[in-house]
Amino acid sequence: MRILGNTLYVTTPDAYLSLDGENIVIQKGGNELRRIPLHNLDGIVAFGYTGASPALMGACAERGVALSFLTMHGRFLARVCGMKQGNVLLRKEQYRVSDSEEKSLAIAKGMITGKLFNSRWVIERAARDYALRLNTEKLKHVSSLIAESLKQISATKTLDELRGIEGEAATCYFSVLDDLILQQKEQFFFRTRNRRPPMDNVNALLSFVYTLLAHDTAAALETVGLDPYVGFLHRDRPGRMSLALDMMEEFRPIFADRFVLTLINTRQVSSDGFVQKENGAVLIADDTRKKILIAWQGRKQEFITHPMLNEKIEWGLVPYSQALLLARYLRGDLDAYPPFLWK
Amino acid sequence: MLVLITYDVNTETEAGKKRLRKVAKICVNYGQRVQNSVFECVMDPALCCTVKHKLEQVINPEKDSLRFYYLGDHYRTKIEHFGAKPTFNVEDPLIV
């Protein structure tokens, strides 16, 4: 398995990123803030209106370092794509599969199975760990509803049917997310999922963490030679990383949602780290964002045994390993796409 | 793994000064300058061989000295720092 490189997050507003030899140099007002060898990095995420030199963008594209630009509030703006890495034949196969509803459905089923399975285990695990503090009956009920949806997946004939089942299960799942918040309940509550803009603290956290996850997943897909913009479940739309979003479905509950819950339940974030605008939109303040990024990086370095590969890898490599398995399936080396089932 | 690269390049002649600049440039490319001629490089064995080869091509073995210290993957417990020139670890969360 590959070595997990580090990700550099640039949050200083008017920093400029440039290339010097094999180093990325971060400057502000003529001063050099940091100098890091590129071979240590897997990705660079720049927040705000950070500038980057064309030479650096070129070097990143050449070395497979994913470079993404986000707004100050973590909304995705742009990313640098170089010459396509990897195999044309693989990508053509991906497009053919994406064009065929039947073949797309087979993969999408796997991904949604993964999502529902994982979200079910998030709930089951909470019910087991905090049996005395939580309404276990309610959780068990929701978990059994999701289990029902899981059974229906194999019978679906169309993508729309599958989306219906997924939507229903997601509503079920989100209906108990609020129960899983154990601390600071007055400031952190979850009523319903809303975005663009997020209207409460928890939604702001979720949106931000999903963006980070999308960056990592798209980068992983690109590394194995797949096109992150051509998906199976999500429809093609200019600028939307459909395949990255497809693949993320499996990781959302276990990777992103649990991470957000941990942040709140261990009081790593508090309500003064959020700013509410006049229109109700909630933004994450600078220092809280830094705390989240540090915790996120730490989470990515934790080890897990991959259920299918039976190999000990870092959490941060899970998107990469799944991308690898998807590529193998498209090449015909695997009979089905094995989703990531966490337990 | 962490590799510590240190060097002493004889700068009595113009050619020596040129060698010093070249050696420094290669080291800067792959690691963090922690002191004037001391570099900490986090790299895998393959990259380490490449860097070693590059440096060997530049130095004059009769006048200059080049040392590699291999501190392995668990180097954090092996380093202590006092005084000026604060450093950072490239494997920790990088937020600027």
Image (cartoon, coloured by chain):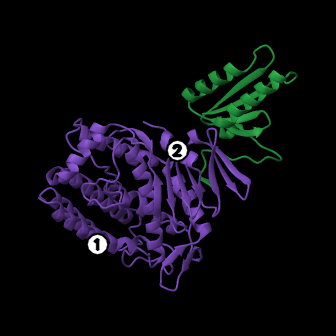
Chain colours: A purple, B green
**Residue B96 visible in the current orientation:** no
Residue A330 in the image: x percent, y percent? 24, 41
Label 1: chain letter = A
Q: Amino acid at mark 1?
A: Thr
Instruction: Report the quarter where the N terminus of chain A lies.
Output: top left
* Disc 2 residue crowd, few under 14, some 14–19, many 20+, Cα 10 Å: some
Label 2: chain letter = A
Residue A35 in the image: x percent, y percent? 67, 46
Q: Is residue A116 above or below residue B53?
A: below
- Quadrant position of residue A150: bottom left
The residue located at (57%, 73%) in the rendering is A270
Left or right? Give the position of B35 relative to A148.
Answer: right
> Disc number at residue A171?
1
Numbered label tally: 2
> Disc number at residue A58?
2
Residue A146 in the image: x percent, y percent? 24, 65
> Helix, strand, or loop for circle 1?
helix
Q: Earlier in the sequence, mark 1 or mark 2?
A: 2
